[in-house]
Image (spheres, rainbow, N blue to C red):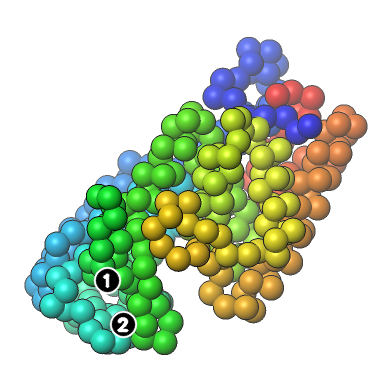
C-alpha cells in the first residue's frame, strides 16, 4: 500500500534531511498555495470588476465560486471565479445575449485588462499581474431547495443550466473538515496534475470527485486514495457524476467528446504512473518511486525517500 499523508513530519525525517512522501506533498502544495500578495491583488480586482457590473446591472450577490474560495487553488494556474447574481429583469431569452452584454461592458470600462472574451459559461478577463485570469458567470435565481439556492447560468447554444455553488462549497468544506484537510489536498493534487499536463478536464469535476471519495471513505491516504479515484474515472470512462448535493443535473467532466477522449487517455497514463509508484515503493526502489512521482507532477516535485511515511 502506498504511504499516506499526515499533517506532522517525523523527527527522524526532519533531522536526517530525508523527505517523506507526506512532507514532500506538503512542500509541493505549499509552494502552490495562494499567498497574501495573491489575495491582495484578487481583492483589488474584485472591487474593480464589481464596480463595473453595478454601473449597468442590479447585482444581488457577487461571490467567489471556484478554487480560490474552496481552498483548492493551484498558483499560478487557477482562475479566480465569481458568480454575479443579477436581477431577473436582466435575464435574456438566450444566455449568449447576457454574456455578450457583460463582455461588452467590461471591454468599455476595464482599460487595465489585456483581453476580455466569452468563454461559456463565463466572461473571462485577463489582467496583468500575479493572478491573471478572472471568470465572471452571470447567474439568475431559479429556485430555493430547503434553503439552498439553485441558479441558472449560461449553457451551450444559448440555453441555461442549473448551478448550486454555495451548496457545493458547503459540501466540500464539510467533508474536508471530516478528513482534517485531506479532501482539499486530494483536489489540489489532482488539479496540479491537470495543469502540469494541460489536461482538458474540469477542475470543478475533479474537486467533486475528491469530495465524493472523502464522503464514502473513513480515511484518506494520499497516493493510495488518488489511485482509487483515478482508477474509478478510468473504469467508468470518465463518466458524468451525480450531484453529491442532489440539487442540479449531472456534473460533466469535460466540454465536449474530443476533450473527454483526451482527458481519459491522460488519466490512463496517470493510473499507470501511480501503479508504478506503488510497485516501486513496495520494492524499495527509491529512484523509480521518485521517477513515477515526477512523471505525475513534474520535476519540481520534491525528491522523497520511499521508505518513509
- Which residue is depicted at the point 41% across and 37% down? 174
Residue 287, compared with residue 156, is above or below; it is above
- Residue 36 versus residue 235 in the image, above or below: above
Question: What residue is disc 1 on?
Answer: 138
- Helix, strand or loop at label 1? It is strand
- How crowded pointer 2 is (Cα within 10 Å; few <14, some 14-19, many 20+) is rated as many
Q: Position of residue 268 (x, y in %)?
A: 76, 60
Mark 1 crowd level (few <14, some 14–19, many ≥20, 10 Å Cα):
many
Q: Position of residue 306 (x, y in %)?
A: 78, 30
Residue 135: image x %, image y %? Answer: 35, 67
Q: Nearer the viewer, residue 44 or 90?
A: 90
Numbered disc total: 2
In the image: residue 18, left or right of residue 177: right
Q: Residue at x 35, y 58 (%)?
A: 164
Q: Quadrant of residue 276?
A: top right
Residue at 41% from the left image edge and 62% from the top image edge: 248
Q: Which residue is mark 2?
A: 95
Quarter of the rendering containing residue 56: bottom left
Is 280 displayed left or right of 259 in the figure? right
Label 1–label 2 contact, CB within 8 A: yes
Marks 1 and 2, how far apart at CA:
9 Å
Lower sequence index among marks 1 and 2 = 2
Work out which residue is located at the far right of the displayed protein and give it. 283
Image x and y of residue 217, in percent: 60, 35
At horizontal 57% and vertical 78% (from top left) the residue drawn is 256
In this image, 118 relative to 146: left or right?
Answer: right
Q: Can residue 255 be seen from the camera position used here?
A: yes
- Which structural element holds mark 2? helix
Nearer-the-camera pick, 309 or 88: 88
Q: Quadrant of residue 280?
A: top right
**Outermost residue toward the front in this view:** 146
Amino acid at each position: 500500500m502506498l504511504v499516506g499523508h499526515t499533517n506532522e513530519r517525523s523527527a527522524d525525517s526532519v533531522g536526517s534531511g530525508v523527505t517523506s512522501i507526506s512532507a514532500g506533498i506538503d512542500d509541493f502544495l505549499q509552494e502552490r498555495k495562494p499567498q497574501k500578495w495573491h489575495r491582495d491583488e484578487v481583492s483589488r480586482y474584485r472591487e474593480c470588476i464589481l464596480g463595473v457590473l453595478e454601473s449597468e446591472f442590479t447585482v444581488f450577490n457577487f461571490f467567489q465560486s471556484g478554487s480560490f474560495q474552496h481552498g483548492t487553488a493551484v498558483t499560478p494556474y487557477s482562475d479566480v471565479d465569481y458568480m454575479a447574481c443579477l436581477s431577473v429583469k436582466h435575464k435574456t431569452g438566450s444566455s449568449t445575449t447576457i454574456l455578450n452584454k457583460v463582455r461588452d461592458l467590461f471591454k468599455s470600462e476595464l482599460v487595465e485588462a489585456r483581453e476580455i472574451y466569452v468563454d461559456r459559461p463565463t466572461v473571462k478577463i485577463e489582467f496583468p499581474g500575479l493572478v491573471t485570469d478572472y471568470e465572471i458567470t452571470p447567474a439568475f435565481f431559479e429556485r430555493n431547495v430547503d434553503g439552498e439556492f439553485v441558479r441558472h447560468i449560461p449553457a451551450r447554444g444559448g440555453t441555461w443550466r442549473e448551478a448550486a455553488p454555495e451548496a457545493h462549497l458547503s459540501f466540500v468544506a464539510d467533508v474536508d473538515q471530516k478528513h482534517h484537510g485531506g479532501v482539499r489536498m486530494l483536489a489540489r493534487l489532482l488539479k496540479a496534475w491537470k495543469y502540469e499536463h494541460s489536461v482538458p478536464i474540469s477542475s470543478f469535476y475533479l474537486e467533486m470527485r475528491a469530495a465524493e471519495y472523502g464522503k464514502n471513505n473513513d480515511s484518506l491516504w494520499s497516493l493510495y486514495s488518488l489511485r482509487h479515484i483515478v482508477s474509478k474515472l478510468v473504469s467508468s470512462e470518465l463518466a458524468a457524476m451525480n450531484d453529491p448535493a442532489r440539487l442540479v443535473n449531472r456534473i460533466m467532466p469535460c466540454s465536449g467528446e474530443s476533450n473527454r477522449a483526451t482527458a481519459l487517455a491522460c488519466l490512463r497514463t496517470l493510473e499507470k504512473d501511480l501503479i508504478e509508484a506503488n510497485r516501486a515503493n513496495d520494492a524499495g526502489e527509491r529512484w523509480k518511486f521518485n521517477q513515477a512521482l515526477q512523471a505525475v507532477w513534474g520535476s519540481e516535485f520534491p525528491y522523497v525517500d520511499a521508505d518513509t511515511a
